[in-house]
Image (cartoon, coloured by chain):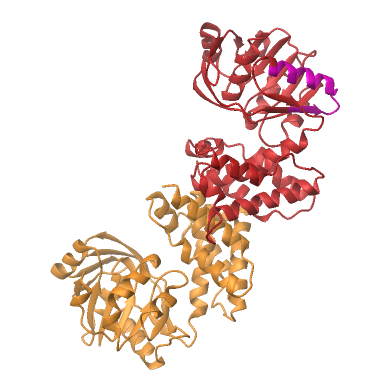
Chain colours: A orange, B red
Amino acid sequence: MRVCVVGCGAVGSLFAAHLAQLEDVEVWAFDLAQEHVAAINRDGLRLTGAGDVVGRLRATSDAAELPACDFGIVATKAMHTSAAIAATAHVFAGGCVATVQNGLGNEEAIAEHAARVIRGTTFPAGKIVAPGHVQWDVKGDTTFGPFEPKPAPADEIERLADACTRGGMPTHAVADARGPQWRKVIFNASTNPIGALTGLTHGRVCEDTALRALVTALVDEGKAVAAAQDIVLDADPEELIDHAARPEVAYDHKASMLQDVEARRLTEIDYLNGGIVRFGDEHGVATPHNRAIWALVRGLERSW
Amino acid sequence: MRVCVVGAGSIGSLFAAHLATVGEVLVLTRRDDHARALNEQGLRVSGRHDFTARVTAASDARDLPDFDLGIVATKANGVEQAAESIGGKFARATIMTVQNGLGAEEIVRAHGRWPLISGVTFMSGTKHSDTHVEYILDTPTWIGPYDGTPFEEVEDVARLLVDSGLKAEALPDLRPAQWSKLIFNATVNGVAALTGLPHDAHFAAEEDIGDLGHLVHELVDEGKRVAAAAGVELHDDPWEMNVLATKRGSAHYPSMLEDVEARRPTEVELINGALVREARRHSVAAPLQTAVYRLVRAREASYS
């Protein structure tokens, strides 16, 4: 079985390096960062932190070099999905394409170019510390399921999930993967931009009762949009938010969106709060708070 | 007629210098070196007008003689300290406030039984040094009676301001103008502080679904509903004030944006806080103004 990871940043690297541990899987990585690609081809792809892994795989910035693949795993930032899948879709003509990205709308963008799509949500996280070297910060599960309008066959989804699990990335194949996805989206959309707009860590956002009430207003809108689509969340985002606020969990964590804002990088706001607003509009659910937060963070991006 | 200006920021300096051309002007400063510089060098105005005025300055109210009119021209969050410094003294004086937001009059009232005049000013200036202010926008100052002050007295003060070269108008009821500016300020200052954007064309843009103008418009509409519930008929439509200001082409940096960038306390309590409290008092929903208020307060909390 041949897998190509499209977008070999931190999360893409976690999948690529782990899958490369398997005898029966040939791994390719497509990424535009030339130094990263050169380092992977020269020294392998190295993970340190939550585990030490070195994966031997082929990396390229030229989509023409990619062979036909059974699976794609798209792991770019959400704003690059369309360009990334448009460049690589030819190698998945006979295969299935999964997303492990943040936010809403990635499956739809992939489905414009691919026939069989896998909806995915992943919790592991890390960061690139040097070309070819990723620090693995957080372990966690991944969920795969069919993208309903253009579904991958269930046995193919299971085949990919099984490979990921055997490689060291615990992954579940489920019939409906929307619950975990919306749980993560609601969590991120309700907390990340609040950190980005105020400069506060997750714990401090949560201990300011007025601000915590604003978080709840955002969560409630997200839940209403999910419910309007008959999506059953696999956990209550409120509980996850309070859990993360504990000192031993993520009290001092600066949301990735705050880190993006401090570094003046474009955020994924269009796919988080913007996604909730768009799905809300489609299903007749009002999302005034998410709309306001979306506009504020977009404004912030435009101030640079 | 002897006038005392309390607080010599840009607005206080503009009042003091102009009034000194038609009468005797005292200036009460916070810093001793500021008072000394004013006494030694006078107060220079450039920009729309060009002159240097002689003023008598002190940093301790006990060093000041009696006066007829006191103008409290500090920032909204400096009113308490300013009122305290003149409290129990200057029994013959009438006191005028010109702060942004609502509530400055009540704060002053708690420190003395002086006749009060409410003011709202649209003029603007930039302080280049302790003794030099540039007069930028010569838009008017509107004043009205507060708590039963005779209107004739308000008219006298307006005449004095006009004689000094400033634009001013006496209104029997100031609340329509005060509320127009309150809604405008809560919206524009709050959004600017959170996004980092100066007051530019983004604030009036309503083309795409995620454009900032939608949020600005909704914030203004919430404010208008609060004003209506409070029985105030607005003098100007804050949305039109917003559009007009963005068309002037000189992207103005609202003071709340300057404050958060310098990590100073902002006027959020007396502007956004006042509007949110009025909404609650009149049982009007103002969810987005409430969100902006909480976010700006949280931004202040992030300084430490």
Furthest residue in direction left, as rendered = A42
Image quadrant for the N terminus of chain A?
bottom left
In this view of the protein, which residue sits in the foreground, B286 or A140? B286
Residue at x 72% of width, y 36% of height: B178
Residue A72 lies in magenta, yes or no?
A: no
Residue A299 higher or lower than B119, as above or below: below
Can residue A57 be seen here? The reply is no
Predominant SS along the magenta part: helix
Residue at x 32% of width, y 74% of height: A86
Residue A233 higher or lower than B209, as above or below: below
In this rendering, would A93 be left or right of B80? left
In this rendering, would B48 be left or right of A135? right
Residue A129 x %, y %: 27, 59
Question: How many numbered tags mark residues here?
Answer: 0
Q: Which quarter of the figure has residue A173? A: bottom left
Residue at x 79% of width, y 42% of height: B232
Residue A95 higher or lower than B61, as above or below: below
Residue B159 lies in magenta, yes or no?
A: yes
Residue A294 x %, y %: 53, 59
In this view of the protein, which residue sits in the foreground, B302 or B248? B248
Can residue B223 be seen here? The reply is yes
In this rendering, would B88 be left or right of B77? right
What segment carries the magenta color?
Answer: B143-162
